[in-house]
Amino acid sequence: MAAAQEVRERRDQVRRPTYTKPELLATRPRELWSWDSTKLKGPTKWTYYYLYVILDVFSRYVVGWTISERETAELAEAFIAETCAKEGIAPDQLTLPADRGSAMTSKSVAQLLADLGVTKTHSRPHVSNDNPYSEAQFKTLKYRPGFPNQFGSLVDARAWARPFFQWYNHEHHHNGIGLLTPATVHCGQAAETIAARHQVLVAAYQAHPERFVRGTPRPPTLPTVVWINPPRAPQPAVEQLSLLRDQPLVSTAASSQPIVLKFRTELSQTA
C-alpha cells in the first residue's frame, strides 16, 4: 500500500510548493530590469487604472510606462515588446524579474520573452524583497507632492504621469546611485558628472579650507554592482560553533588525574 501511495493522512492538508529565492546581479544598464503594476484610484468607488512600469535596476531609469483600464496579458506583451525594441535589447542580454500576477505569468508573455531571448524570473509569493526597486519607485510616485487621491479619467492619469516620469528620469537625484539622475547613469555620463563635481569640490576646498573640517570633500560614488537578494557570506561564528559541535566529548571519568575539591575553612565551620 505504501508503494502505491495509498497510506497517507486522511485529512486534506495544503502542500505549498517551495520557491527559490532569486539572486540577480546588474553591473551596467540594460542588463537587469524590474517591472510591476500598481493601481491608481479612479473617479468612483471600485474604479481603478493600472500603471505598468519597467525600471532599469542599475540606473533606476524608467525605460517604459503605460496606464490602462484593465490588466491583461495582451497589453503586457505589447508593452514589453515595445520597450525592448526602443532600448535595443539583444538576445541573451536582459533579465526581467516580475511578480506572480496574472499578466506576468501568462503564456503569451512567457512566449514573447523566449522569442526575444530575455531571461524571466518570478518573485516569491508575498515577498516584497524580491522586487524592491519597483516597490520603491511606486512609493516615490505615490508620496510625491501633488499626487492626487483619485483621477478623473484615464486621460487625466496619463497627463499627470507624463511630467512625473520626466522629472524622475532627468531631474530626480537618486540617493542609491550617488545623487545622480537616472538618465545620467543610463546614458553613460556618470563618470563625467562625478569628475566635474570633484573639480567643484576641490575648488571650494582651496578657497575656504576652514569650512571643511574633514579634509578635501569627495563626491558620492556610483555603485559598481546592484543586487536583488545578494548571497549571504558565511558567518565565521557559526562555522566555529559547528566545528565545536562535531568534536567528540571528553569524559572526566576517563582522565587519570584525580578531582580535588577545595573548601574555604571559614565556610566549613559551624556556629
Image: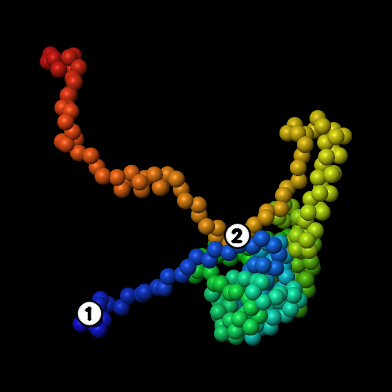
Rendering coords of residue 249 (x, y %): 24, 42
Which amino acid type is marked by label 1? Ala
Q: Is residue 227 above or below residue 98?
A: above
Q: Is residue 248 above or below residue 3?
A: above
Residue position marked by numbered label 1 in the rendering:
2
Asked whether the viewer can see residue 35, the reply is: no
The residue carrying pointer 2 sits among few (fewer than 14), some (14 to 19) or many (20 or more) residues within 10 Å by Cα, namely some
Tell me what residue is drawn at x 64 percent, y 74 percent.
92
Q: Is residue 50 above or below residue 22?
A: below
The picture quadrant where one finds residue 83 is bottom right
Q: Is residue 200 above or below residue 271?
A: below
Residue position marked by numbered label 2 in the rendering:
227
Rendering coords of residue 130 (x, y %): 55, 65
The figure's colour scheme reads: rainbow
Q: Secondary structure at mark 1?
A: loop
Of the 4 image quadrants, the one containing the C terminus is: top left
